[in-house]
Amino acid sequence: MRERTIVCLLSLVAAVHVFVFSAAFPFFNNVDEYAHFDLVLKYSQGQIPRQLEPLSKETTSYIAVYDALEIYLWPSNNCPTEQTPPLWTQPMKKAAPLLVSRQKGWEKVINHEAWQPPLYYALAALWWHGGRWLDLDGGSLLLWVRCLDILLVVALVWLGHITARILFPENLFLRIGVPALLATMPQTTFYSISNDVLSPLCYGVSFILLIRWLQVDVPGVRLGTCVGLALAATDLTKISNLPLLTVSAGIVLFKSYRLAAAGKLRAALPMLAALFFCAVLPMAAWAVWCKYNFGDFTGAGAGAHFFGLTHKPFSEWWHHPIFTPPGLWTFVSGLTATFWRGEILWHRVPLALPTVDWFYVGSSVSLVIAALVALLPRFKQASGRQRQALTLAFLNVAVAVAFLGFLSVICDFHNNFNPSREHPYFTLGRLMLGALIPFLLLYLYGLDRALNRLSLQTKFVALTLLILFMLVSEITADWAVFFSRYNWFHM
């Protein structure tokens, strides 16, 4: 009962944390928030884009009033937005010509995210209608859409607790530690209108179901259905979850092989049929939609063409700096830092503190290594089920990292800002957020093993210090954001 109370308090912390920072950041941030917002509005009107098309008029009417993208992308010494008061504070007679001019300019902007899978936008569209029903409008309605993240993060906190409780019923430190880090993680994706925020929840459910899949003798139809729906949701949330789905497919095939070897495949056929109908059919349906409307089975080709990305010849792959120790470290450290804190800029500078980034990188690498060492059979520090789960967790993280490394190698970024030819690395941590719960299990298990000789109370002191460090460093890095007259607090 006391443990459940603690998780309830952590859920409250998560809700307040996400709300405060969602309200502090002006609309619309540099991580394509305007494009994701446009898709939410189009889905709310029953419009599923069939091509890369301009922003809708309703979208541009909101952007014209509330947009502060220049604050994110322009240097502070010549940012026009910083030099003028928000339009919503100006007399209508003065603001009207500017609104018309801005709206016409934005109506020419193409939404390059139109090919993205539909699940997040469908959920956010329903949430948008809920805000309308509550008579919200203007900036409050925009914040309402961001606040969908509160529900998703609170659900993620509980999922993290349930996962740790199932896998480590004897380890209170992990059962509390995983939801505690989820509640206080300084990932700016959680404060934005973006489909990335749904990935850790969808694959987190898939992860724990796959563990169950491996453990049962013959999986039943109910489990096959649940696994299939969770994997379909993961696929229909973000194409960058493909590496995690690849690992999942490997788990399914491995289990099928084990069943066949044991002569139990016939008994498992109903389960496999349920998995097929619930996972493969929705995935295939969306792939056909993308092929018909965007020219390839993922739709990603349309986005790559929009940005002018091309594939390098095979012979040029091996000249990439990632194959050198400094280049590999640049990739791993940059990806790890943004995985923890996100990618929002402020006056074209990352909202980051170098020392804090080094801490996230150093602790992540060292604690994951500590977790892997502890899994070696000679140490006998984890049960067979726990070794299986943590091994799967590591595979998910490793494959997600390898996938982004592979994209870094094969792509020519031409004149793009990030990644670029000067910095040819996909160090975009939000693209692997689907592996968040598996990563935190590894991270905290490594910390638990590193503090193995200390008391449980001392471990919780260390966890508390880590959480305080995360919160204080996040507030310090984002301090200027709270004083922007373009955020919700000043509306």
Image: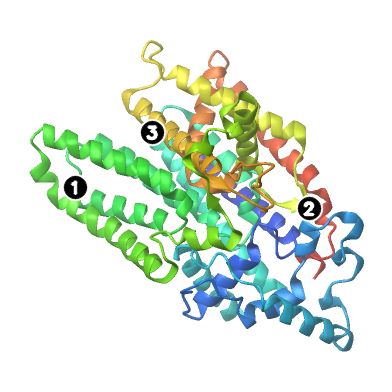
**Residue carrying label 2:** 346
Amino acid type, label 1: Gly
**Is 264 placed left or right of 474 in the picture?**
left
Q: Is residue 198 above or below residue 258?
A: below
Q: Is residue 41 visible?
A: yes
**Label disc, if present, on residue 220 of the rendered structure:** 1
Structure colour scheme: rainbow
Decide which of tag 2 and tag 3 comes sooner along the chain: 2
Residue located at (69% from left, 80% from top): 61
The CA distance from mark 1 to mark 3 is 21 Å
In which quadrant will I find the C terminus?
Answer: bottom right
In the image, residue 233 lies at what x, y percent?
Answer: 39, 57
The CA distance from mark 2 to mark 3 is 37 Å
Q: Nearer the viewer, mark 1 or mark 2?
A: 2
In the image, residue 314 lies at what x, y percent?
Answer: 47, 40
Q: Is residue 51 above or below residue 430?
A: below
SS at mark 1? loop
Amino acid type, label 2: Trp
**Residue carrying label 3:** 392
Decide which of tag 1 and tag 3 comes sooner along the chain: 1
